[in-house]
Image (tube, grey):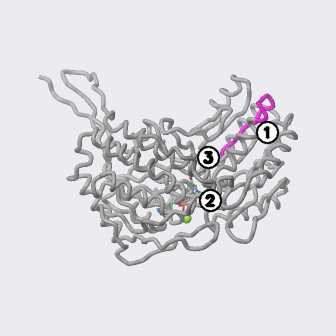
Amino acid sequence: MSAATAAPPRKAAVPKIRQTKLLIGGEWCDAASGKTFATMNPVTEEKIADVAYAGEADVDRAVKAARKAFESGPWHTMDARDRGRLMNRLADLIEQNQEELAALETLDNGKPIRDSRAADIPLVIDCLRYYAGWADKISGQTIPIRGDYFCYTRREPTGVAGQIIPWNFPALMTAWKWGPALAAGCTIVMKPAEQTPLSCLRLGELAMEAGIPAGVINILPGFGDTGAAIVKHRGVDKIAFTGSTETAQFIMRDAAPSLKRLTFELGGKSPNIVFADCDLDAAVAGSEFGLFFNQGQCCCAGSRVFVEEKIHAKFVEQIVSRAQARKLGDPFDSETTQGPQVDRDQFDKIMRYIESGKNAGAECLTGGQRVGDRGFFVAPTVFDRVTDDMEIAQDEIFGPVMSILPFKNLDEVVQRANTTCYGLAAAVWTRDVAKAHHIANSVRAGTVWINCYDVFDAAAPFGGFKMSGMGRELGEAALANYTELKTVTMNLK
Ligand code: NAI
Ligand code: MG
């Protein structure tokens, strides 16, 4: 299959909203309570559509449908090659509807169309194809144990997976969750974020069209209470969650009575370390991308930029001019590089942190204010002379706010980079190979980028040390989240 050949238009067309209901057991339905909620456009602050709001009764029905599809349905018992084939068919349908899905993502989330076209949706397709390839390659081992026995292991699907995702990459987080779960033979009860349910619902329609059996994927839009009902339900075997560290703590407590398997991909305060011997142009461009991409709404954003004193003045001058050159505006225009923040809560949180930085004495070199009076636009903001103890150096801001922290030497910067409760990602910019690997080995983070930032691939595992998470997504590693290991021993005498 090849992607559409015609160049997409500069102004993307606003997509039609096709689906706003719950998906349960292969049927699209209203919530049992009849309740709906509005999903909002972050550019206009107006309602896009009313979406069905799943409550406890809907969660119960969806879990039962998922259990049935798991236990007696054709999913994990079907030929693994056929499972892979259906996943590939879904990927093909997504590819055929790429422009519509990109526009839907931009409408609901506010992210620039150039990013949804070039990053979000292509990565969704890659992820599903990558895991489609795993479906028939999940195998166990034969183990030489003492005595006259034949011992081997099997990898069996965990069962019904509850999957709860955030709003920053709505379609991509759906794919990261569906890919390994489907390949392993699990069935799914998915809750998209309340801010951005639309692309997940459209993916659900495409999954039905692809022929993925009824009940294998169930989708329940709703808020935190919907998520909590999934977490507490006894019919759910495992929870995979991406979002805030605080919500993960709630989930751990709610999952305790039934000892569900848990995997978490949470917040970060990632250090981005720029040494004087780097390629400065590349480091500045990479630092801009590493922080401002997706309006700063990335769990792995390089939000603590450590810059060696010797190049501090030059770095600051260049990053400020790049921050000021960012094009804020209509995300449907392909020239726009920065859209609005996703909603008022996130906008208010960011503005509070900007005030906190100013009050703590950090130098605000550019930005620091709202842009316009409609839509949640925040000017690209750069704080200099940030110190480790400031709130803006410790908390996840999740917005277009860069903190620059000057440093003098290697040992100092390693120690300071690790002075955080988080450990999701880190980057280092240097031409010195030994220094690069010293940093890669010393920084406590799940991902380290050397002379690059935000390089993601479906094959490469991603996840956090410390309070940034548990378990890994993507790659072969994510299959462990959706399989149980079974040991079988047979007496040969
Ligand atoms: P959140 O963690 O509250 O929301 C994420 C998802 O969890 C949503 O689908 C939400 O409905 C659901 N949820 C909320 N409460 C729940 C509960 N008690 N049980 C089960 N599910 C529940 O994150 P929120 O409020 O959208 O953002 C707050 C902050 O979290 C952000 O400012 C950012 O710092 C961080 N965050 C990190 C993300 C990441 O990619 N690691 C993504 C989104 C937010
Ligand atoms: Mg919330």
Quick check: 202 left or right of 301?
left
Q: How many marks?
A: 3
Q: Position of residue 128 (x, y in %)?
A: 42, 44
The residue where tag 3 is placed is: 300
Q: Residue furthest left?
A: 493
Which one is earlier in the sequence, the residue at label 2 or at label 1? 1
Q: Is mark 3 within 8 Å of ligand 1?
A: no
Quick check: 82 left or right of 289?
left
Q: Is the Cβ of the residue at disc 3 closer than 8 Å to that at disc 2?
A: no
Q: Is the Cβ of the residue at disc 3 closer than 8 Å to that at disc 1?
A: no
Task: Provide the secondary structure element on which disc 3 rests.
Answer: loop
Question: Which region is colored magenta?
Answer: 270-281
Quick check: 124 left or right of 58?
right
Q: Residue furthest bottom?
A: 34
Q: At 23% from the left edge and 44% from the top edge, which residue is drawn?
A: 78
For badge 1, the amino acid type reads Val
* Image vertical order of residue 117 relative to residue 354, above or below: above
Say which of marks 2 and 1 sits in front. Answer: 2
Q: Position of residue 113 (x, y in %)?
A: 60, 54
Confirm whether residue 467 shows in the render. Answer: no
User: For residue 274, what is the image quadrant?
Assistant: top right
Q: Nearer the viewer, residue 335 or 72?
A: 335
Residue 466 colored in magenta in the image = no
Q: Is mark 1 within 8 Å of ligand 1?
A: no
The residue where tag 2 is placed is: 332
The residue where tag 1 is placed is: 307
For badge 3, the amino acid type reads Cys
User: For residue 277, what is the image quadrant?
Assistant: top right
